[in-house]
Image (cartoon, rainbow, N blue to C red):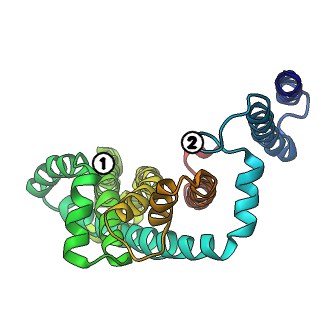
Amino acid sequence: MMYVLIALLFWAGGWVLNVRLANGPRSDLLVIKVAIPAIFGLTIVVVWELMVIGFEVNPVILPAPSSVLSRLAQEGPILWADFRQTILKGALSGYIIGAVGALIVAVIADRSDFLTRGILPVGSFMAALPIVGTAPIFVKWLGSDWESKAAVVAVMVFFPILVNTVAGLKDTNGMQRDLMRTYAAGYWPTLFKLRLPSAMPFIFNGLKIGTTLALIGAIVAEFFGSPTVGMGFRISTSFGQLALDMVWAEIVVAALAGSAFYGAMTWVEKRVTFWHPSQR
């Protein structure tokens, strides 16, 4: 019970500290904005550790953070190989293919109302397909290496980016388009100087959605066939061996990679759409 009491006191202390920082006179400072989530995360980790020790939780059910960190330190080369196989090869390559393809198809569909009306319902249908159904098919077609994972990711990110881009290209109003016509601007000058810049908030919304889908798609697709490397393969085999600390180590790596990927896309968005009211 002593560990449980310490955990509760630590949680209360972290809560009080964060409340004071958030409501303090310097809450707008960057260091305060970074400190608040850092303190919150640290509090969760410490409370988790103390609760596991205090209640003597079986490591098979829930390992302590210390054992997960130990596994991260010990299995660095294996985790890096898994990261490279799943994230860099499967997720990132598939994300780029799907995003570029979606942007090209959106511009083509934008020139035809018939294509726009036809693609959006198909996109909604394809986005609703379960990954557990499509992943085995791509593994059968393209083999068990990263190419099949990239294909799964490309399909998963394609339609959210496509739908958002098409919606963004339709966002300009009649007065803006009439102004471009008075300048004798054709379709392509209007597209690059008016409609694409106006669609950027929509496009980046789709790109940010795609960052999380890419990681999910690449990892889950590895459950249905992969070489003896990859985050999905390692999670599946480690769970079968009851090595839950290794499973949590892979989850930590995936979470950090996903957060970094999303944060990088948000950073690019702020610099591209600095003029938009949402960035002010």
Q: Position of residue 25 (x, y in %)?
A: 91, 28
Q: Position of residue 149 (x, y in %)?
A: 35, 69
Dot placed on the residue nearer the N-terminal end, 2 or 1: 1
Question: Residue visible at 68% across and 34% down?
Answer: 57
Circle 1 crowding by C-alpha within 10 Å: few under 14, some 14–19, many from 20:
some
Element under disc 1 = helix
- Residue nearest the viewer, comparing 36 with 276: 36
Residue holding disc 1: 167
Q: Taking 69 as reference, is 150 above or below it?
A: below
From the viewer's perspective, tell me whether residue 6 is left or right of residue 103: right
Q: Which mark is residue 35?
A: none
Q: Position of residue 136 (x, y in %)?
A: 24, 63
From the viewer's perspective, tell me whether residue 210 is left or right of residue 9: left
Element under disc 2 = helix
- Residue nearest the viewer, comparing 249 with 264: 249
Q: Amino acid at mark 2?
A: Pro
Total tally of numbered discs in the picture: 2
Q: Taking 239 as reference, is 98 above or below it?
A: below
Taking the view exactly as shown, the residue that stands out farthest to the left is 114
Q: Check the picture and name the quadrant holding the N terminus.
A: top right
Q: Amino acid at mark 1?
A: Ala
Q: Position of residue 81 (x, y in %)?
A: 57, 77
User: In front of the other: label 2 or label 1?
Assistant: 1
Residue holding disc 2: 277
From the viewer's perspective, tell me whether residue 240 is left or right of residue 144: right
Question: Residue visible at 56% across and 70% down?
Answer: 83
